[in-house]
Amino acid sequence: MNYNIALVPGDGIGPDVTAESVKVMDKVGEKYGHKFQFTTVLAGGAAIDAEGTCLPRNTVDVCKNSDAVFLGAVGGWKWDTLPGDQRPERAILGLRKELGLFANLRPALLFEELAGACPLKAEIIEGGLDIVVVRELTGGIYFGEKGYKNTELGRAAYDVEQYSEEEVKRIAVVAFDMAMKRNKKLISVDKANVLESSRLWRSVVTEIAKGYPEVALNHMYVDNAAMQLVRDPKQFDVIVTSNLFGDILSDEASMITGSIGMLPSASLAKGNFGLYEPIHGSAPDIAGQNKANPMASILSFAMMMRYTFGLTNEADEIEKAVKSVLGKGCRTADIMSPGYELIGTKEMGDRIVKAIDEQ
Ligand code: IPM
Ligand code: MG
């Protein structure tokens, strides 16, 4: 089969890690007889420098006309002083909206080979951690009405949190479906003790639960969820939550695995279309130095195989290769500990390609 992928390397270490994923894509394509065709486009700071805008129209068009989008990372110090609506990060928000990517899947998986990197006590994470945050991605306060006004207390600024029933329903369905494929446990996180939008959220999620009698649904306030994630993370399996709460809790969940350089993500539209990217940012301090960990990007490619192309064997194979390379003691600087072999971005990509070859 032929697959058309829009490649958005972006800024900082984005191009470094994306290049390694492309090596892996070529190897998987060769092994399984697929042709992954790329169209490389600009977004973020790279697009600001080249075209004066963080999300050129051509980038959106190419993404829309592709089967999936593969993104590195955007942003960096260089563009930090630009006004809010011109910053590289706007490219991500624009792509999410334009491409209808309403469901963000963020797995926080503790690789047993890297258990030592987890900042929590060993007894708290005994037996491993495997959580998926399902974050609503095109609604809520990120996209609500926003602006400035003058008040008697001086200038005021506002961002409105608004959710419609339809928006909550469709993300709830994604989360319940995910729970059905896993351990049939779902925690919906909101702030229903204070926010009207959360009360609507809670009632819609409860309504959708009727269609999933096998799934054990619980509701949790976001402040409590933030605490429970470090107190007893093993109580979580699938978490479903709003755009803003999901942004915060997914960073927390990834931190407790201790290895943000390992974690992929998928942002899905209705149907199979999706955008895949590592959870980590652009890390401009190590860009272009062969230091970044390409595994999160490579695992994002595995998610693309699984969720957009339905190529489960290929996805399993990539994940297996990553684990096998870790098992052999190879480490990039971010996950290095004494006694292991320190290697660079490119070497890590090569080892994973080799592992796929030998599997
Ligand atoms: C993320 C990031 C983005 C977000 C930023 C870069 C706009 O933090 O993907 O979690 O807040 O959604
Ligand atoms: Mg974030």
Image: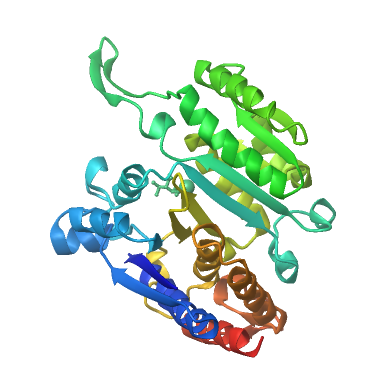
| Quadrant position of the N terminus in the picture | bottom left
Which one is in front, 43 or 117?
A: 43
Which one is in front, 133 or 337?
A: 133
Q: Is residue 353 left or right of residue 339?
A: left
Compared with residue 146, is residue 34 higher up or lower down, i.e. above or below? below
- Residue 319 x, y percent position in the rendering: 63, 71
Q: Is residue 130 left or right of residue 102?
A: right
| Quadrant position of the C terminus in the picture | bottom right
Q: Is residue 122 left or right of residue 244?
A: right
Compared with residue 348, is residue 6 higher up or lower down, i.e. above or below? above
Q: Is residue 124 visible?
A: yes
Which one is in front, 260 or 274?
A: 274
- Residue 288 x, y percent position in the rendering: 37, 77
Residue 185 picture quarter: top right
- Identified at 62% across, 31% down, the residue is 189
Q: Is residue 12 visible?
A: no
- Residue 31 x, y percent position in the rendering: 54, 85
- Residue 261 x, y percent position in the rendering: 55, 65
Outermost front residue: 1
- Identified at 44% across, 59% down, the residue is 281
Outermost top residue: 152
Compared with residue 67, is residue 39 higher up or lower down, i.e. above or below? below
